[in-house]
Amino acid sequence: MFSHPLAEDVLRDLGDKVVGALVDATSATRADLADYRDAFPGWVADSSDRGLSNWIHDRLWAHLRRRLTDVDSVELVDQGVTREITVGLRYRARVKRHTVRDRIRSYATKSALAFWAQSDALEGLEEVRLGFGYRWDPEERVIGSTIVSLRDGLDKDAIWAVEVDAGASGVAGTEFTWTPVDPSLPQIDLYEALAPNEEDEAT
């Protein structure tokens, strides 16, 4: 039976270089989107939800690649629509945008279903699959907080989600705030319910 690791343990294991790179990459991507909007406001306004999401994902991945390429124990996998970050032997992450309820979306491919279902290996040997990304405001179309999340299943609510602030970059004792997830109460995200499930696995 998979024992879900605590958020503080995961952040400690990932280390300041990895968490800081995610924060910095999200900040740089946020700036890219602002520049894109300033230079081509009509293009951004005309972009589909899926198209803009993919553009943001490409920019975020580019920034992460530059910041993580030389970090020890980190490996980047870029194969078509599947992009993953492995940290050591235990952690594997996919870059995803999160709703305000910390839900993610993806086609229910075999790869996605296998990735988001946590493994049942022996304790201490299991691989932990994480979501790296950001919160997305669909009405304002802006990039919010940097997020690290854990879930067990593609269509499941997050077991936990951590909002990481800019102070995390390069600073010992990463500062973070909790996003409460109460498994006993249903969470309804109207945007999630109404929006078409059109994102590919990369977003």
Image (cartoon, rainbow, N blue to C red):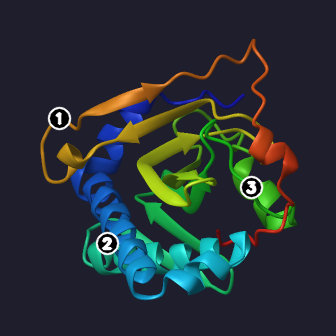
Horizontal and vertical percent for residue 39?
Answer: 40, 87
- Between the residue at mark 3 and the residue at mark 2, the CA separation in whole angstroms equals 25 Å
User: Which mark is nearer the camera, 1 or 3?
Assistant: 3
Q: Amino acid at mark 1?
A: Gly
Q: Amino acid at mark 3?
A: Arg
Return the residue at label 2.
Answer: 68
Horizontal and vertical percent for residue 148?
Answer: 47, 45
Q: Nearer the viewer, residue 64 or 97?
A: 97
User: Which mark is nearer the camera, 3 or 2?
Assistant: 3
Q: Amino acid at mark 2?
A: Leu
Q: Earlier in the sequence, mark 1 or mark 3?
A: 3
- Describe residue 166's horizontal placement relative to residue 105 as left or right: left
Return the residue at label 3.
Answer: 105
Looking at the rendered image, the quarter that the N terminus falls into is top right
Which element is circle 2 on? helix
114 above or below 63? above
Q: Locate residue 25: give its quadrant.
A: bottom left
Badge 1 local density, few (<14 within 10 Å), some, or many (20+)?
Answer: few
Image point 59% across, 59% down: which residue?
Answer: 96
Q: Nearer the viewer, residue 151 or 59?
A: 59
Which label belongs to residue 173? 1
Which element is circle 1 on? loop
Q: Are marks 1 and 2 in contact (CB under 8 Å)?
A: no
